[in-house]
Every structure is written in C-alpha cells, then in structure tokens.
C-alpha cells in the first residue's frame, strides 16, 4: 500500500503540472485602483496638475469634460471612442448630430500630451478622460472619487451607434429608466444621481428652446411644468432660432459641484426636459426631494462617487483588448509585426512550460 502510494504521488504531481501548463497566459484583467502605480506612478498627479491649471483659466470646462466622459461610456463603453475623429470612410461618434454640443476634447488632448511625455505609450486616452472627469468633480468642490484605472482604447467609433444608446425623441422617464437598466445595468437611483452632474456646466439654447417656444410642435407654446419666472428669464437669454448661446444648468452656482441642482429641479427650474422628467417617477422624484432638502451634500457625494465608478466600468477594454493610442483622435498606425510578436510570446510561454514539465517529471519519477 505504502509503495503504491509513493508511486502514485509523482504521477498525480505530473498531472497537476500538465493541467497548469494547459492554462494559457493571463489574458484578462480588470480595471483596478492604482493600475499605473508601477508603470507610470505620476500619472494621476499629472492629470490633476493639468486639470487644476486648465480650470483656473477656464472654470466652465469642468462641465464639458464630465459630460464628455459620460457620453463616451454610454456608447460602446468607457474606451475613448468619442475622442476619435471621423475619416473619409467613416463618420465618428463625435460628429453624430446628437453630440454636436459635446466639448472638452482639447482638454483631453493637452493632458494626454503631458502623459506621453512622461510615460510614452502607457496611459490610455480612455483613462486620461476618466481621470480628467474625476478631477472635474474634485476641483469644483465635489467629492474625491477613488477611480479604478487600466482601461485601454477602442478603435471603433461610428456615429450610427449613438442614437440606439441615447433616449429617443419624446422618451418618457420610464423609457430612460428602462434604457439605463437594460443597456447599462444601472438603476433609477443611478439615473437620479448621475443627473446631479448637471450641477456644473452649460447647455446650448437649442436644447431648451423647444420648452420655451415650441412645446409639442405648437408654435409659441411653452412647457407648463417649467416655472413661469424661469421661463421668462430663459426667453431673455435664448431668442427664437438661437442655437449658439450657452445657458447655465445651475445658475446659482454654475461652477460648484453641490446639491443646488436638486433644489432647482424640485422647484420646476430644471433646465432640460430630462431634468424635469425626474419628478415624474416615484424613485427619482424621491431622490430629488431628499437632496433638495438635505442639510449636507455628504449623501449625494457618496452616491455620486458610487454611481460614477459604476458608470466608469461600462464596456471597458483591458489587457490584450484595445490599444494605448498615441494620439487620442486617431487609432494607432498598423503594426504588422505585433501579431508575430504575440505569437512568439505565446510559443515562448508554452515552450518554457513544456521544459518545466519535462524537468520536474524526470525529477519526480526518479
């Protein structure tokens, strides 16, 4: 019995080794806090330094950068596709009619250039945008959000992908909640919380004019759910046909991340129709009321951090998927040898594994 057991032990060990060797090299990773701690430890400090300088000169850029990140995440995932330019053969996401008011691209480009100078080919455009958006919140007196990194950049950006991932014209609050749940696995609370990003930033008159002059296609009709005095104020800012003027989403504190947005929405002074729609669902309406009456922003800040991180994980590309773009507006040039290098690395891994098996097998069977 003892001799049989001793004879079986090497065989069992050999089978274990064969099993381990059959497992391919690690192929999948997830975003994680401090993903650049070893490869570019100064990355997050660089982003914060650049965002601090940018917002010191142009405080109104915080809102566009935050919106740019959400637009990226909700179409194909947080993989930087919104940053890609159109080509002769393809109209990119940024040139979709639904994204004509989106801005902040120059901010990402400037920060990416600094990151490339410090750590060439390490930090993705997707993470550059994610960190810049995170710091837009922090630098406007909002919460600091510990943000997982390690995203890689996608190479698909198609304008036709935008509409299916956006609320359709005339969408109800139920439609928007269903979109969040079915496409993004986010809740009605996430919707109410992430809408709080409208506490900073501005919108074009073209987005609000239908509520002022043409509700339901009726010429001259305004939205009766919009506070009358606020309607008059907005009509003074947005004349009929004005598509260029920018209006503050949160007039009392347009560059401060706070709960004033919810106070405005609760008082029928939400600028966008989607803001007003939050009052039409029990869950989102309750959240608006809670924050409008809160004596501290602490709960909103905690909720926003959680929902922001949940959004930031949508459709991320990691490890072997995607690339690290050199320039955020363009996919990298083809690298024909990369496939051969990858195959060689795979062969090297398996060759080393077989050599290890042979050596250990001989030792175990001696």
Image (cartoon, rainbow, N blue to C red):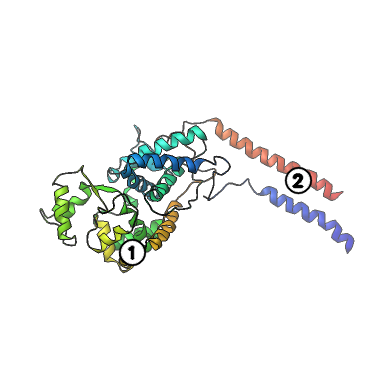
Q: Which mark is residue 357?
A: 2
Residue 90, located in which quarter of the rendered image? top left
Task: Please tell me which residue lies in front, 39 or 62.
Answer: 62
Question: Could you say whether the residue bearing mark 2 is in a helix, strand or loop?
Answer: helix
Write the residue at 84% across / 50% down: 365
Point out the image quarter for the N terminus: bottom right
Task: Please tell me which residue lies in front, 259 or 271.
Answer: 259
| Horizontal side of residue 348 vs 323, given as left or right | right
| Mark toward the viewer: 2 or 1 | 1
* In the rendered image, the vertical position of residue 81 relative to residue 89, given as above or below: below
Q: Which residue is mark 1?
A: 291
Q: Position of residue 211 (x, y in %)?
A: 18, 55
Residue 6, located in which quarter of the rendered image? bottom right
In this orientation, does residue 76 appear?
Answer: no
Question: Could you say whether the residue bearing mark 1 is in a helix, strand or loop?
Answer: helix
In this orientation, does residue 212 appear?
Answer: yes
Q: Earlier in the sequence, mark 2 or mark 1?
A: 1
The answer to whether marks 2 and 1 mark residues whose Cβ atoms lie closer than 8 Å is no
Q: Position of residue 342 (x, y in %)?
A: 59, 37
Dot 1 alpha-carbon crowd within 10 angstroms: few under 14, some 14 to 19, many 20 or more:
many
Task: Please tell me which residue lies in front, 364 or 303.
Answer: 303
Write the residue at 51% across / 31% down: 335
| Horizontal side of residue 5 vs 139, given as left or right | right
Which residue is at the far left? 220
């Amino acid at each position: 019995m003892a001799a049989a057991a001793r004879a079986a032990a090497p065989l069992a060990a050999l089978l274990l080794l064969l099993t381990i060797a059959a497992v391919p090299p690690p192929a999948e990773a997830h975003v994680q806090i401090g993903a650049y701690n070893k490869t570019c430890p100064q990355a997050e400090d660089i982003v914060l330094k650049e965002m601090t300088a940018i917002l010191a000169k142009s405080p109104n850029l915080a809102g566009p950068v935050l919106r740019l990140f959400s637009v990226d995440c909700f179409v194909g995932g947080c993989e930087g596709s919104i940053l890609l330019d159109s080509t002769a053969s393809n109209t990119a996401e940024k040139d979709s009619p639904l994204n004509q008011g989106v801005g902040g691209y120059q901010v990402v480009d400037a920060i990416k250039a600094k990151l490339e100078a410090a750590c060439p080919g390490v930090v993705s455009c997707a993470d550059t945008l994610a960190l810049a958006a995170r710091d837009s919140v922090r630098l406007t007196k909002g919460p600091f959000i510990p943000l997982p990194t390690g995203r890689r950049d996608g190479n698909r950006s198609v304008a036709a992908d935008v509409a299916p991932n956006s609320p359709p014209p005339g969408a109800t609050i139920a439609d928007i909640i269903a979109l969040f749940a079915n496409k993004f696995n986010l809740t009605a609370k996430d919707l109410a919380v992430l809408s709080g990003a409208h506490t900073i930033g501005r919108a074009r008159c073209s987005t609000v004019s239908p509520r002022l002059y043409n509700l339901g296609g009726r010429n001259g009709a305004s939205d009766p759910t919009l506070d009358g005095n606020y309607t008059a104020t907005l009509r003074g800012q947005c004349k009929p046909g004005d598509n260029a003027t920018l209006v503050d989403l949160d007039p009392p504190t347009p560059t401060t991340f706070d709960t004033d947005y919810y106070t405005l929405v609760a008082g029928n002074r939400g600028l966008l129709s989607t803001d007003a729609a939050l009052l039409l669902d029990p869950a989102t309406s309750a959240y608006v009321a809670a924050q409008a009456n809160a004596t501290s922003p602490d709960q909103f800040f905690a909720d926003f951090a959680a929902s922001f991180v949940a959004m930031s994980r949508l459709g991320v590309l990691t490890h072997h998927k995607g690339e690290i773009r050199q320039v955020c507006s363009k996919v990298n040039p083809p690298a024909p040898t990369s496939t051969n290098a990858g195959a060689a690395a795979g062969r090297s891994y398996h060759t080393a594994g077989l050599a290890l098996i042979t050596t250990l097998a001989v030792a175990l069977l001696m």
